[in-house]
Amino acid sequence: MLMKLVMRAAALLALTAAASTVGFYAGAQSKEGEKPKTTLKVGQIARVGPRIITAEQVIARTYDVEQVMKDEQFRILTNSVNYLVQVNLLDLEAERIGCELSTKEIDSEVARQIDEMKRQVKDRYGGAVPWPEWLKQQSLTEEGLRTYITKGARTILLKRLIVNYFETSTESYDLAHILLSDKQNAERIWTQLERGGNWKDLVAKESKDPGTLNTDGRLPRHYIGDGLFRLPTQDKPAEKEELTEDIVAALKDGEYSGPLKSQYGWHIVKRLKTYPANKARFHDRRGEFLAFADVDEKRFNRWVNVVTSRGDYTTEFRIPGLNCEPDK
């Protein structure tokens, strides 16, 4: 957590440094105390003689650089676009359910995060490095850190409120599966189950999914539309013997499917337990959600997958070099 916050602070400083550099060049071309003049318009980034450098060109150049970046975490353009899309999805959902945040709630969240940072600094250094000294080492000020955290506090609170409301107000299932490499083996295992074979033993001996061998084949909690299985649509109906959302939804607790194929192989899926939707209104449970822990990226991305795959909100992209050619 501490390292993540330090990295966030470093990113803030990088942006500040970039802004300072721009200010230096602008100031070098104008008289002291004179406000720099510009003829550039929206969508124009810089001018070199008569030539204009556009935002499209900058985005395309950023994309070119990202092509050599193997780590998705450091792909600035993709991450920036995804972040803005996700923030807008949160805003739209907040409007839909009537989720508003007060200044007091945001200030309280900022104070909580700063107190947590102070605690971690104290635990890490045993009190040998006072908080003001640590800030100085990071080239930060209390005011600058507070301003930066405040910008993200609203998003953190919306995630906590909206994702927890979604998870508790949407029917979900505990599932398990046995993954086989081909149809013949899947049918063989299904026949053994039908004859009374032990699910746990068959998972351990036969399943090709190393990630679920130690959990009796158990999968993450499943919400219809979360991307775990394909959701058939009018444009893309289910193929025969394809593992899809509607098949999973039709199972009852304790039942398992016949052999079904996906891009990963052949599955036999068992529905372990159903969690019914809590139909209470959002505002009746709002305080409960605020008291929950922060929502991690895995849960948040699952929510994003659900609202987009269900068609609650449509998304579209036009990134030069990725979805289209520059300036087109």
Image (cartoon, rainbow, N blue to C red):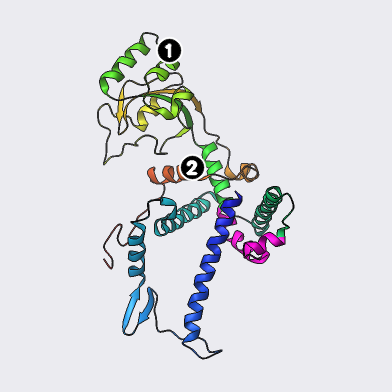
Q: Residue at x 74, y 52 (%)?
A: 127
Q: Looking at the figure, which quarter contains the C terminus? A: bottom left
Q: Which residues are magenta?
A: 132-155
Is residue 148 in the magenta section? yes
- Residue drawn at x 65%, y 56% is 110
Circles 1 and 2: CB atoms closer than 8 Å: no
Please determine whether, in this image, residue 23 is positioned above or below residue 233: below
SS at mark 1 in the image = loop
User: 223 above or below 121?
Assistant: above
Q: Amino acid at mark 2?
A: Lys
Distance from label 1 to label 2 (Cα)?
Answer: 32 Å
Which residue is farthest bottom? 31
The residue at which mark 1 appears reads as: 198
Any part of residue 326 in sight = yes
Q: Is residue 273 left or right of residue 189?
A: right
Q: Name the residue beneath numbered marker 2.
A: 298
Residue at figure coordinates x 29%, y 19% from the top left: 185
Q: Is residue 35 above or below residue 221?
A: below
Nearer to the camera, 254 or 80: 80
| Chief SS of the magenta region | helix
